[in-house]
Image (cartoon, grey):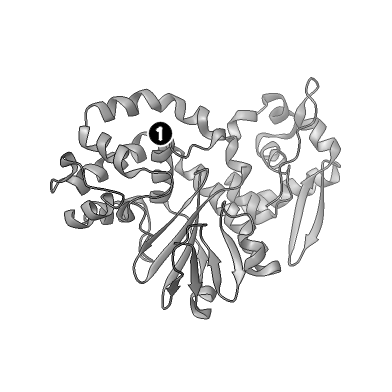
Amino acid sequence: MGDWVLSPDVLAGGRFRVSAMAETVATLLSLAGNGEQPGWAHGLAGHRAAFRARLAADPVATRFLATAMGRDWLPDFLVAPPHPEDRDFEDEWRRLRATPPAVAAADTAYTGPLPALLRGPELPERVAELVRWVWTETVRADWPRRSRIFEADIVSRTQALASGGWVAALATLRPGLRWLGDGRLRINAHPNPPRALADAELLFIPTTTSRGWVGWSQPHRYAVVYPCSGLLAEPAAARDGTALGRLLGANRAAVLRRLATPRSPSQLVALTGQPLGSVGGHLRVLREAGLVRRRRAGRSVLYYRTELGDRLLAGPDEPPAEPLTST
């Protein structure tokens, strides 16, 4: 599928959304060695032995991964977009588990004959249980932090959308994705006929995937899953210097750490989990101390670290951190 042709109503209704199921599938891909985001390697390393043991005890899941997890294609039933009424992982997971066996088999056999091991009626159940294991063992405990970071990424994307339209919002979303104008969205370079999306819901979902994917439940729901910005490459605790926390206070230091690129107060709320009033107070103190500056971008006010702030964050024995590319 090369291009999606979007009607004006579909485009106007397109929105960004967080999905626990999409993030769990992204983590499954990483554990399976397909699509890992390098910055998360340390976070998954402790789970790989358990994941291998889980697969060794489940030949159906092992064969499913070998058959279905290609670099250019994923089974539709595994990556179907969330419904509007879905609120958490359980809602999306129940839909996955309820997939009719014939549908799961047809989706899995897209690239060739279905292996005999995957032809039984238990295929959706076994796949759903594997996905639940990944959620329970590797994602659930960290989900509050990840979801806050995804929400911050969405704030950044929607700001770009407001100031520059879909061209700006989609420019760096995922490799191969490009807004062509006249309602055409380039999904990939495959020479497939354009697909017209009419009377459909279009979602954009950030995850820790390195490449992303597209998913659909035809004819009314489509999703583009894309790599979240570089903020996810390093969990907050990885650079939580205790000396800096003692000097500034843990919450104020957490705000300063997240200002290597310009961020709005609402983005900082999503990233740190602190209330808006507290974030505003920390920004005021940091600005008065010369550690951050601010500038206006459209309707938003963005804060960013000064050179002094970079030096303070780096510590006495390290050079200032290179700023990340702004989204």
Secondary structure under tag 1 reads helix
Query: Which residue is located at x 23 percent, y 55 percent?
Result: 106
The residue drawn where x is 44% and y is 73% is: 197
**In the displayed structure, would residue 5 be above or below residue 98?**
below
**Rendering coords of residue 245 (x, y %):** 69, 30
Identity of the residue drawn at 66% across and 69% down = 165
Q: Residue at x 21, y 46 (%)?
A: 114
The image position of residue 38, as x and y in percent, is 55, 34
Callout 1 amino acid: Leu
Crowding near the residue tagged with mark 1, few <14, some 14–19, many ≥20 C-alpha atoms within 10 Å: many
Residue found at the very far top of the displayed protein = 317
| Visible residue check, residue 165 | yes
Q: Is residue 196 left or right of residue 91?
A: right
Comparing 205 with 241, the one in front is 205
**Residue at mark 1:** 31
Q: Position of residue 14 (x, y in %)?
A: 51, 69
Give the image quarter of residue 49.
Answer: top left
x, y percent for residue 154: 58, 57
